[in-house]
Image (spheres, rainbow, N blue to C red):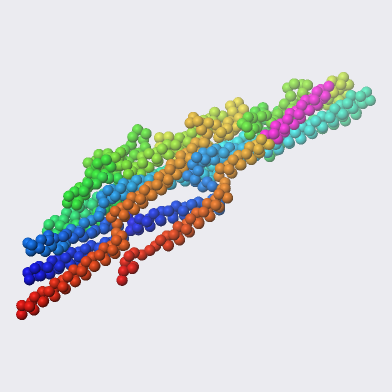
Amino acid sequence: MISSLRTSDEIFVASAQRISARIDTANRQINSGKRIHSASDAPDQVATLFTLRSNLGRMEQVDSNLSQIRTEVDTAEGALQSAVRLMDRALTLGAQGDTSFSNPQARRFLADEIQGVLDSMTGLTQTAVQGRYIFAGDTDQTRPYDTDESFYAGSETSRRALHPLGTTFAIAHTAQQIFDNEDASRNVFGSLRAMRDALLADDSAAISTAMDGLRSSSSHLSEELAFYGGAQGRVADAQETAKAEVLRMKTQIAGIEDTDLLTASLELSTATRDYQAALQARAKSERGSLFDFLG
Amino acid sequence: MSGLFGALGQTATAMRAFERSTAAIQNNVANVSTPGYARMRHMPQADRFEPSEGVFGGVLPGAVISYRNRFTEAAVRERTSQWARQDQSASQMGQLEPLVSVTAGSGMAGAIDRLFQSFSQLSVAPNDLNARQVVLTRAEEVAGSFQQAAGTVDAARGQIDSEMRSTVRKVNELAARIVELNVAKRRNLAPEAGGSPDSGLDAAMHNALEELAEHVDFQMLEQADGSVSIFVGGGQLLAIGDRTYPISLGTQTPEDGVQRRTVLNSEGLDITATIQGGRLAGQLDGYNRVIPMVAADLNALAESVAGEVNFALQSGVDMNGAPGADLFTYDNSIGAAGTMRFSGAGVRELAMALPGQEGGNGNALLLAGLASQKQTNGYTFGESLGNLAGSIGRELQGQRDRASVSVSLLAQAKSQRQQDQGVSLDEEAAQLVAVQRAYQAAAQIFRTINEMTQDVINMAR
């Protein structure tokens, strides 16, 4: 563009604008705490920054997921603890009915108690977290067992939890697996029904056989409890890993985008001093011409 | 006696010569800040001195010469063209920088990350209708962010196109102005006009040339009559004598379907490749190379995101056990980014389970995993966006650095021109004192000769 400024003035203005831009940049970095506001501030680091942020977001989501999963797993573990205690009570009741001192009336009473245990077990299958039946497999909106504990309304479980390192791990068994297993020696409902029926029939031999069934079912419940204990451990380990990764990524991101306050402050004071010096030097360099000295 | 009268006449002629010198100095001082002005100097000539033949010498008014240096003028124009091109490119790239925001969580990067995080969240409770609705909302955000980015590219393209039309118009206006000045210069140098150069016309001509250099690079030929001929780019005639040959803008659509702008000479021939300097060169580069490159990267990314997500959804089953519905629609022929839309799929149509595992989260985990999966270009979505931002930032930083260097080089060239042909008040003051003293001396001689003449007349009485 055509300018009527002297060339020396144009050079001074351009230099002053460059110093002013340095002041603006330093001010912006100090005020915002961020070194990078646009891609041109650090073009070679922007790609890394984007990748780290994406990974951080993903990891934070995984951590949040694991917190939800932990609630489910803890709740399931608690339900299994209750189931184990119920089974212990059933074993006690069965043992009482298995003695020669028991009479038909007493055995009928014990049978009612066993039915109570069975009902409580059925109730445990309907354990829910945030409206989801955690033992219903993939169909978590459906009660696995209603009043009829012989009909499983849920489905298989295929769900897995995502580990921060990208793998997945199992976190749940179905109510059918836990309480109504195909293997008769592991079928909690079956063993309780067998004991109830034996007590009602006042059949000592059947009661003894049912006791064996209760013991093997109790063993199975303990294994299921151990599974959920293991799941809790895996979730806790995954959460620890996620948190460590989140911290690592945040540190890396801060290293890239956060302002180095010392450097920015020094730059600000240096640029401000340079600007004032340039203005003062320019003011002093203004002189007239020989015409000023001619009479 | 005749010698005395002759001396009187010669002294008067000398004083006339000194008056012209003073006028030239006065003109220089008056035009010290006039853009395009080159200092002028009156060059008096010594007359023949041969007293034996009765020729008594003296000083005659001479020519007024201009100190204009063609080479430094050409250097300023060349640097101006270079600076203008760099400045234009930096300005254009600056318009594209907001395309990929580096603020955490914002823009396309933030929207894409949130979409895949919503898949991850849904993997915990794949039948949760609220969580499914969040996925649909995030999908709308992603489509919106790509549309906005495409809009930014289109706006930048439109801005450059508008500036290009303005530049071409300006080039043709300046060519017309130069032609007017050519005619005026010829008229000024004609014998009936006195034949002396006009410093005002000269300054106006060089201003017009310098302004033209900002818009387009050109070569100039100066004719004997003071007029100039202008050839843009690699030798395309723009103006000669009293005629202009205007340039215009054309359009070309090559195989890739992306419209390109061309510059046509007055005969309609494509001279785009010959334009290498000035704002027009920067605008052509921006419109024909930079914008299509950025748009292509953006469209490729949009197609990749939408395509991969849709494919994964089609491979799974929804809450009804049917293959999943697409989440996005787009039109590749127009541009995936600008046409990307949320498909309008319902919450139950999202396929979060694998076939045979209705209600499961297998497909949700696969979809969440897309965020960290390398795509066909070898990069994840986040890396691709980062690379796009980085390339824009690098290009912009480079353009700004080059523009800064160009400013310094232009200033150097102008400084050299100032030294060669500018007006120095100190020099003019010294010249004025010298001319004033010479005038005073001549006046003193005139007085002395006058007294001598009077004495001779008195003797004759």
Residue visible at 73% across and 36% down in the picture: A74
Q: Which of B62 and A37 is in front in this view?
A: B62
Q: Does the magenta stretch include residue A227?
A: yes
In the depicted view, which residue is nearer to us: A276 or A187?
A276
Decide which of A82, B116 is in the foreground and name it. B116
Q: Magenta stretch: residue B157 in it?
A: no
Q: In which quarter of the image is the C terminus of chain A?
A: bottom left
Q: Which of A244 and B451 is in front in this view?
A: B451
**Res. B35 image quadrant:** bottom left
Evaluate whether residue B372 shows in this view. yes
**Residue positioned 60% across, 39% down in the render:** A249
Vertical order, A6 against B379 (above or below):
below
How many numbered dots are placed on residues in this image? 0
Q: Can residue B341 be seen in this view?
A: no
Q: Quadrant of residue B34?
A: bottom left
Residue drawn at the location 13% of the way across and 66% of the way down: B10
Q: Position of residue B24 (x, y in %)?
A: 23, 62
Tell me residue B338's x, y (percent): 44, 40
Residue B429 in the image: state x and y as whole percent: 29, 64
- Looking at this view, name the residue that lies furthest to the bottom: B461
Taking B383 as reference, is A165 left or right?
right
Q: Residue furthest right?
A: A101
Farthest-out residue, left: B461
Q: Position of residue B348 (x, y in %)?
A: 58, 35
Q: Which residue is drawn at 32% across and 65% down?
A: A290
Q: Is the magenta stretch mostly helix, strand or loop?
A: helix
Q: What stretch is highlighted in magenta?
A: A212-238
Instruction: Say above or below: B6 vs A89.
Output: below
